Image (spheres, rainbow, N blue to C red):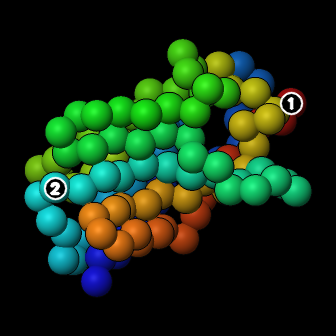
Amino acid sequence: QVRVVESGGGLVQPGGSLRLSCTASGRVTSVNTMGWYRQGPGKERELVASKTTFGDTNYADAVKGRFTISRDNARNTVYLQMDSLRPEDTGVYYCYWRYRLTYWGQGTQVTVDS
């Protein structure tokens, strides 16, 4: 089993920034992918960004140039720096850890509102 725990959500004004953190623990492997999905009100869950232990990175078109994913492999931790936030970025952000199986965090709420 792998446990995934996120932190860092909250309320921010449009144009502001937030940083999400996520740590995996338990039976983690040295090769894996970690990343973030989000689900906005009335929307389907969508991939935001992901990063492998080798450094391969993927971003949704909607966040390119505004969000940055990074990770500390030694700490099994991934970060999502979110800048220039927009109201449409509002949603629950879910971290995941994946190697053959996918494990999810409980989600953290991000609200962008003036």
Q: Is residue 45 visible?
A: yes
27 or 80: which is nearer to us?
Answer: 27
Q: Is residue 24 above or below residue 31?
A: below
Residue 39, above or below 27: above
13 is higher (above) or lower (below) than 104: above
Which residue lies most toward the bottom here?
A: 1
Query: How many marks do you count on the picture?
Result: 2
Q: Residue furthest top?
A: 65
Question: What residue is drawn where x is 54% and y is 71%?
Answer: 106
- Give percent across and percent down for residue 16: 66, 24
Report the disc number at residue 114.
Answer: 1
Image quadrant where one finds the C terminus: top right
Q: Nearer the viewer, residue 98 or 75?
A: 98
Percent of width and height locating residue 21: 41, 49
**Quick one: label 1 or label 2, which is nearer the N terminus?**
2
Amino acid tagged 2 = Val
Looking at the image, do the residues carrying marks 1 and 2 touch, with CB atoms under 8 Å apart? Answer: no
The residue tagged with tag 1: helix, strand or loop? Answer: loop
Q: Which residue is depicted at the point 18% across and 39% down?
A: 54
Apparent side of residue 52 relative to residue 103 in the rendered image (left or right): left
x and y, in percent, of residue 18 in the image: 56, 35
Of all residues, the one furthest to the front in this rendering is 100
In this picture, residue 43 sits left or right of residue 98: right
Instruction: Calculate the distance from the C-alpha at mark 1 to the C-alpha at mark 2.
Output: 41 Å
Residue type at tag 1: Ser
Q: Residue at x 68, y 56 (%)?
A: 45
Residue under numbered circle 2: 31
